[in-house]
Image (tube, rainbow, N blue to C red):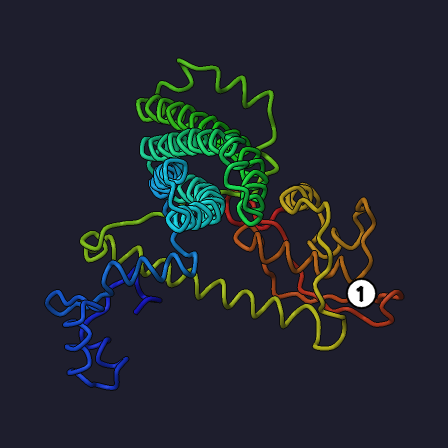
């Protein structure tokens, strides 16, 4: 049940854990170990909190625990100084040592959890406004944690008290806590810088999103070319020409998919997938026989497939001859050229004409004859390029 603490445990699931013994479930509920809410069963908050603290899996930043420890520490130090009874002074001293030992652990844990929360909210929150709010809340927790560290440092600076107590274990705890606070201050500085970087990145994303919205609005109203310099930018920058074609997922509603238009779209997608599967089988059957060439993946370094495809379209050769003869930099061996041929053909099969012709070439490097399918580029009309 503890493993499923973030989900919902039904009564039926709980009975499975105790081999169907419903009386045991009732006994645990009566002892306030479990809480039953209708058909749902969950661990009591005290048991859950104890297990999370003991296993150190609670990712909530608990600055209030540091505040409580500081209050108890100050109180017991004052009690110790005012007390004259030796036995009572020992009891207060024991509590002081317990508080000092636990403070360092809680502070370190809070810093770690705060860092995890910052990264989690930055990466998972999709709403820009909520993302900024959450990161700013983490910043407030970080600032509060810095204030608490300064308070603890002030307590540890009370040399008169520690000289009065004159306890070796207390001095050791004091030194250990000083080192913990030093490391915590360094980590808090890094956390603050991370928060600033996250806020700057989110702000930049917001500005880019707003600009994209404005561009889309102009495009939808057919005013983009008239009111912006987009044509000049495209004329000066050819980077997109060498990029792979971008696809954006569409999420039509279930109601629309049940219409005739939706049925036509589904049928079209099914036919396209069947066509791709068939073409892949044809390509594999027509290129290399099993065992002819080592089929281990090659290292695809500095190969721009879109650029290779574009140069092939501009040539008057078939795909295999073009790749086989092209002077790549760095140079590719015969096996890498064959695999590049397969890769380009599969990536841009919609722009290729898979003819029924087969040809072969003898490779001295591989010591065998390679048989391949003749593939030509398609023109805009759908016919092979002359």
Q: Is residue 75 above or below residue 22?
A: above
The quarter of the picture where residue 371 lies is: bottom right
Residue 22 vs residue 311, the one in the foreground: 22
Relative side of 9 to 53, left or right: left
For label 1, the crowd category at 10 Å Cα-Cα, with few meaning under 14, some 14 to 19 and many 20 or more, is few
- At horizontal 52% and vertical 31% (from top left) the residue drawn is 160
Residue 119 in view of the camera: no
- At horizontal 34% and vertical 41% (from top left) the residue drawn is 68
Spot the residue most to the right. 364
- At horizontal 74% and vertical 77% (from top left) the residue drawn is 291
User: Can you give x and y, in whole percent of width and height, for residue 189 in the image?
Assistant: 54, 30
- At horizontal 72% and vertical 57% (from top left) the residue drawn is 320
Spot the residue most to the front. 85
Relative side of 347 to 81, left or right: right
Spot the residue most to the top. 227
Q: Where does label 1 land, which residue?
A: 361
Residue 94 vs residue 240, the one in the foreground: 94
Residue 165 vs residue 75, the one in the foreground: 165
User: Can you give x and y, in whole percent of width and height, for residue 270 in the image?
Assistant: 37, 63
Indicate the secondary structure of the residue bearing disc 1.
strand
Q: Is residue 125 above or below residue 297?
A: above
Question: Where the N terminus falls, by quadrant?
Answer: bottom left
Residue 265 in view of the camera: yes
User: Can you give x and y, in whole percent of width and height, for residue 153 in the image?
Assistant: 50, 32
Tally the numbered discs: 1
User: Can you give x and y, in whole percent of width and height, for residue 184 in the image?
Assistant: 53, 38
Residue 148 vs residue 202, the one in the foreground: 148
Relative side of 52 to 352, left or right: left
Relative side of 367 to 283, left or right: right
């Amino acid at each position: 049940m503890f493993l499923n603490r973030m989900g919902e445990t039904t009564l039926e699931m709980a009975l499975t854990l105790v081999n169907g013994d419903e009386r045991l479930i009732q006994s645990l509920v009566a002892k306030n170990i479990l809480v039953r809410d209708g058909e749902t069963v969950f661990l009591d908050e005290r048991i859950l909190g104890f297990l999370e603290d003991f296993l150190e899996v609670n990712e909530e930043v608990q600055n209030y625990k540091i505040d409580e420890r500081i209050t108890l520490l100050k109180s017991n130090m004052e009690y110790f100084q005012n007390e004259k009874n030796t036995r009572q002074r020992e009891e207060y001293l024991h509590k002081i040592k317990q508080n000092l030992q636990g403070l360092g652990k809680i502070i370190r844990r809070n810093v770690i959890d705060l860092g995890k929360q910052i990264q989690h909210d930055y990466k998972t929150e999709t709403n820009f406004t909520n993302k900024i709010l959450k990161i700013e809340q983490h910043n407030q927790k970080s600032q509060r944690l810095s204030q608490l560290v300064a308070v603890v440092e002030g307590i540890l600076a009370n040399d008169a008290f520690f000289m009065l107590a004159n306890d070796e274990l207390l001095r050791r705890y004091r030194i250990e806590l000083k080192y913990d606070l030093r490391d915590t201050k360094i980590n808090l500085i890094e956390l603050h810088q991370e928060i600033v970087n996250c806020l700057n990145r989110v702000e930049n994303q917001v500005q880019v999103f707003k600009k994209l919205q404005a561009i889309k609005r102009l495009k939808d109203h057919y005013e983009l070319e008239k009111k912006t310099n987009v044509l000049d930018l495209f004329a000066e920058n050819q980077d997109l020409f060498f990029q792979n074609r971008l696809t954006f997922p569409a999420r039509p509603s279930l109601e629309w998919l049940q219409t005739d238009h939706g049925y036509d779209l589904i049928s079209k997608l099914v036919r396209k997938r069947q066509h791709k599967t068939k073409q892949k089988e044809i390509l594999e059957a027509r290129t290399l026989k099993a065992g002819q060439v080592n089929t281990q993946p090659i290292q695809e370094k500095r190969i721009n497939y879109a650029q290779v495809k574009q140069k092939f379209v501009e040539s008057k050769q078939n795909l295999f001859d073009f790749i086989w003869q092209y002077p790549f930099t760095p140079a590719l061996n015969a096996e890498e050229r064959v695999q590049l041929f397969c890769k380009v053909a599969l990536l841009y099969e919609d722009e290729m004409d898979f003819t029924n012709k087969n040809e072969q070439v003898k490779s001295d490097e591989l010591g065998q004859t390679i048989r391949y399918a003749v593939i030509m580029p398609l023109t805009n009309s759908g016919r092979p390029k002359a």
